[in-house]
Amino acid sequence: MKIVVDAMGGDFAPEAVVEGAVLATREFGFPVILVGIEDAIQKELDKYEDAKDLPIEVRHASEVVEMHESPGKVLRSKRDSSMKVGLDLVKSGEGEAFISAGNTGAVLAYSTIILRPLKGVDRPAIAIQLPTQKGFAILLDAGANVDCKSNQLFQFGIMGHVYAKYILGMEEPGVGLLSIGEEDGKGNEVTKETFRWLSKSHIRFIGNVEAKEVYRGNADVIVCDGFTGNVALKISESLAEMIGKNLKTLFTSGIVPKIGYLMLKGRLREFKKSVDYSEKGGAPLLGVNGVVIIAHGSSSAKAIKNAILRAHEFVEKKVNQHIREDIEYNLDSKGSFWQHIKEIVAGHDENGGVPHKAEPSPVEDDIDTDTEEIETTEDKKPTEEPEK
Amino acid sequence: MKIVVDAMGGDFAPEAVVEGAVLATREFGFPVILVGIEDAIQKELDKYEDAKDLPIEVRHASEVVEMHESPGKVLRSKRDSSMKVGLDLVKSGEGEAFISAGNTGAVLAYSTIILRPLKGVDRPAIAIQLPTQKGFAILLDAGANVDCKSNQLFQFGIMGHVYAKYILGMEEPGVGLLSIGEEDGKGNEVTKETFRWLSKSHIRFIGNVEAKEVYRGNADVIVCDGFTGNVALKISESLAEMIGKNLKTLFTSGIVPKIGYLMLKGRLREFKKSVDYSEKGGAPLLGVNGVVIIAHGSSSAKAIKNAILRAHEFVEKKVNQHIREDIEYNLDSKGSFWQHIKEIVAGHDENGGVPHKAEPSPVEDDIDTDTEEIETTEDKKPTEEPEK
């Protein structure tokens, strides 16, 4: 099993990425392919005496995707970027998983187009681990899909359940739907319909979860559209930043508070680290044919190492196979349920769409892609059945 | 100018509400009408020796709306609640403004049905003041409308501008649109269209604002739909709660941190107070014919006093008149702009609706209201022209 790593992605690339690969291969032993500008990668590798003995391959890609380039432009113009070359390796089966700390939008767009969504999944979703009062919760979608229909939110619920169960080892994860009231009937049009669907699925659906409950940790998985998810995460960062700054100001004016602050400084640093999810191994892009992990832009070598370990877990624990099976379980063996859904859709919901029918990717609609470059992966050997 | 106060609304009603009215009338001198169960109110008033000399009237209403009753049920069954009697006083012109710390959904529903939306406004919105690194920002809608169209978000922008300008005294408030990227093209379908409309309005539109910017305070007004706004506020509360608990745990294990914590405790309390917007005079429901202030459920007497002062300001500074004029300015004198919008709407946007055409209230659609009870207020003397 080979893990493909975008050596050019992230604020500290290629240094931190190469170091992360060295740390991971030393510690875990499974092979890594570093993709990017060969000379730059080799120069970094040469810093480590044992690098030539480690299972690290280098694959050249001449172009680099910058952090703030528009994904559409990247797809059109960068045919030999480290992201595209890396994802092609996963598509061809040479690699099992892809990791990048680069431009999130570009990773998302490339992954969707090159790997294609899994059968039964309309759109991939980014799943983030949030610290809570009780440990961790998974929130998805964290920003991949701004306009979501209820069938997509339903699939996010299934995918989040699989992630929590097989990667985080939760026996029966509680899946909640982010809404503005706990009562069953509360929410907007999309969440209300999603509520009905999740209620009838095989996962442990705990109903609506209000945002004030998120950090209390009573839900293991929190389902929302990417717009709301992005706002929820980013406003949390914004508030944490303000609280940090205000506390510092309050604590460092006046001699008594200043001494108090100095006594607490170590603990504050510890706390900051405990809630910093950039160290937690990155965020998986769930629902594509292949494992893709999006690492934080500011990833350190340790964060990259953790992401490589996380990617390995996703492959080994056959997460994609479980997602497909769980979605199929709802499609097939609950025929009457889906029949019911179809009737609802046909009857009075013109926005819902038939849940299991994949629609064209929004990325493709958006951009002027050469279609001959985009091959279907339908016949491709699924990545979640690794070669032994 | 009389301010009508729901004496039965809030966790500490009627005690805290009556005390708030006593404090306000003592300090500011303008008359207050307390609505609710007469005996209970009088009993509270009797605690204050000077109460009979203060400009406080009591108006009996036999029913009380409980905090967790469904608004639909309340509207159908409670014909003599303190909310309904109070809002009827504003509708009849006897009172100028209404304040309640009770069930928010019920205040919203009663206000929309009894007072009706202002001309040019489709739906009223709840506007919250948020603390930021630079002072305060207004966020609307904080939860009144879960499914918003772009014409509504556009109106929220105008209403937020008026609030910031005339109540908070900002010369040229910067109005931002909450979205998931700063670039013009980022957002979902609704925000993208709202972006175009706000760009062409007369207010100072500063473009998209990412959630990570909210607490930095670069936008004076933040526009979003009520679902997103509610999530943003509630998740902030949730995170603040977790940080508070975690800090306390971290700080009180081990003797050095414990001493440090004790030295800082006072400052922490100060900080908590500075970000507690329940003390800030409540959240106005913008866009109805009349002034309505929704106070926090846990309002203290001081919070009620502040809400009474805030309501007085809204009347005195003719906020509703300014909202109407500013919306009309965009409707009339920018004919070509609205013509353009109409063409867009007629052409390819079946969701947009004609921006200035009010649609039936969702509350009415929802419930089984006796229509004979709901009179139109079109002929009513506008409340923002107070009797001198």
Image: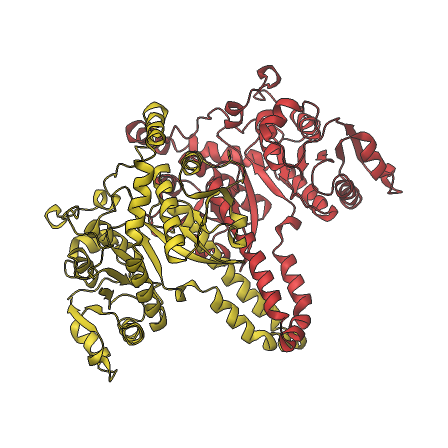
Chain colours: A red, B yellow
Q: Residue furthest left?
A: B372
Q: Quadrant of the N terminus of chain B?
A: bottom left
Vertical position of residue B321 compared to residue B35: above or below: above
The quadrant where residue B348 appears: top left
Q: Is residue A203 left or right of residue A290?
A: left
Q: Name the residue nearer the viewer: B229 or A384.
A: B229
Q: Name the residue nearer the viewer: A60 or A333.
A: A60
Look at 33% across and 48% down and name the residue there: A186
Vertical position of residue B378 compared to residue A77: above or below: below
Examine the rendering and report whether any part of residue B287 can be seen: no
Examine the rendering and report whether any part of residue B42 can be seen: yes
The spot of residue A377 in percent (x, y) is 59, 22
The spot of residue B10 in percent (x, y) is 30, 66
The spot of residue A263 in percent (x, y) is 68, 72
The quadrant where residue B155 appears: top left
The quadrant where residue A134 appears: bottom right
Look at 61% across and 68% down and name the residue there: B250
Look at 63% across and 38% down and name the residue there: A293
